[in-house]
Image (cartoon, rainbow, N blue to C red):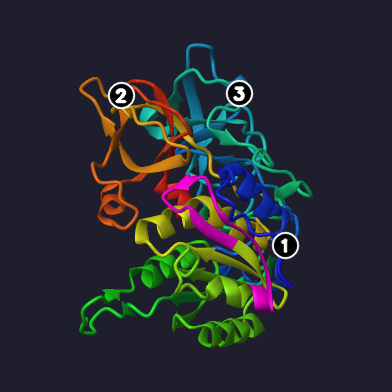
Amino acid sequence: MSGPVCDSGKLMPVDEAIARLLDKAPPPPPVQKIPLEQCLGRVLAADIHSPVNLPAWDNSAMDGYAFKAADLPQAGGYLSVVGRVAAGDGEASALLAQQAVRIFTGAPLPAGADTVVPQERCRVEGERVWCPPASVGEHVRKEGEEIRHGHLLLKAGKRLRAQELGLLAGAGVAQVEVYRALRVCLLSSGDELREPGEPLAPGQIYNSNRYCLAALLRGWGVEVHDYGVMADELTASRDALTLASSECDLLLTSGGVSVGEEDHLKQAIEELGSLDFWRLAIQPGKPLAFGEVAGKPWIGMPGNPSAALVTALVVVRPFLLRAQGVEEVLPLPLAVPAGFDWLQRNKRRQYLRARLSPGADGQLSVELHPQQSSAMLSAACWADGLAVVECEQRVLKHDKVRFLSFAELMH
């Protein structure tokens, strides 16, 4: 069966394409319970509530002296030092009036103490210590002030970074329910493609998309299954897609979705499943398609390297994150003054390779690379993000433009 193809010259807006993709995203993969140390980049399949208070007890935020604030005169004064408490020590003896203990960062406060003064503000004289004025609770981490037992620690749909792993470890969580890594088939289309290191005959080029896209996919937490290059021939395309759809959750191809006579991929998709649309109002990257093969979602990306990169970052990334169970999938753009004039109106939304540049006053502005070709990756290597120019928009220097950081888009 084949579905409707947007091939009448009318271009689909980028936001509409993303919304349609998200509506068609498959449910996430099955749930696994795995050790915490294996969870980096995986997506939580269930809410996690804290099994403990964090912190588990009142403890010191400083190396210093702990005491009861009410025992200290308003102008500061002397207290008797009656002990020493370090991190890892058991419960210390309760303090009596006018007493203090030497305490170290992370150590539990003894009963009777409610305040800590840093050691550099104190003066030790024999078995006494002079402490300056202090407020109740100063430099004390209160039990449960970060999170209380039973409260929500992390919400399902969160992709786990280093800081989430640290938080879970701090709460004593050793096993986590996450979605299995999404298995994505990566295929290239084109008889002209050769691997780096191989000799090139006339008309042949090296397959840069294979390496660029595979790196992006791994950065998004998916399990990449690289099926190499399909020949520009209908039977070869059909066979490769059939095999990939039997082994993966989702198919991603580059090349073979333009209007060329040798692009047989669209026909193979239509014979094996459905083709929904393939022309977007985006530059670079107009020829982009979505459909399914044997019930598995398929996205066909353009073959030009910069076009493949930009459409992957802008359009494919939200879909793949949602297919992994991630809730928040759209990037948050920055509004930054343009350091350029862009006077040529365009019927497509443009994603220009750009970077943030500080001026003499320290304020950031968006600087463009002079080469914005859809075939060249050198501009993307120079850039640290994408400047967005809307359809039919003219930009003058100092106008605010949206800037999408590679640091976010590649995570």
Residue designated by label 3: 136
Q: Residue 340 at x, y = what percent?
A: 28, 28
Residue designated by label 2: 363
Report the mark closest to the observer, 2 or 3.
Answer: 2
Q: Is residue 401 visible?
A: yes
Magenta residues (range)? 270-289
| Amino acid at the residue labelled 3 | Val
Q: Secondary structure at mark 1?
A: loop
Looking at the image, which is closer to me, 158 or 98?
Answer: 158
Of pointers 2 and 3, the one earlier in the residue sequence: 3
Which residue is located at x 74 percent, y 64 percent? 27
Of pointers 3 and 1, the one earlier in the residue sequence: 1
Disc 1 residue crowd, few under 14, some 14–19, many 20+, Cα 10 Å: many
Question: Image check: 29 left or right of 265?
Answer: right
Q: Secondary structure at mark 2?
A: loop
Looking at the image, which is closer to me, 121 or 262?
Answer: 262
| Amino acid at the residue labelled 1 | Ala
| Residue at far top of view | 75
Residue designated by label 1: 45
Report the mark closest to the observer, 3 or 1.
Answer: 1
* Above or below for 238 versus 139: below
Count of numbered labels shown in the rendering:
3
- For residue 18, the mark is none
| Amino acid at the residue labelled 2 | Gln
* Cα distance between the residues tagged 3 and 1: 42 Å
Q: Secondary structure at mark 3?
A: loop
Task: Examine the image and state in which quarter residue 145 appears.
Answer: top right
* Above or below for 193 versus 98: below
236 in magenta: no
* Above or below for 248 versus 152: below
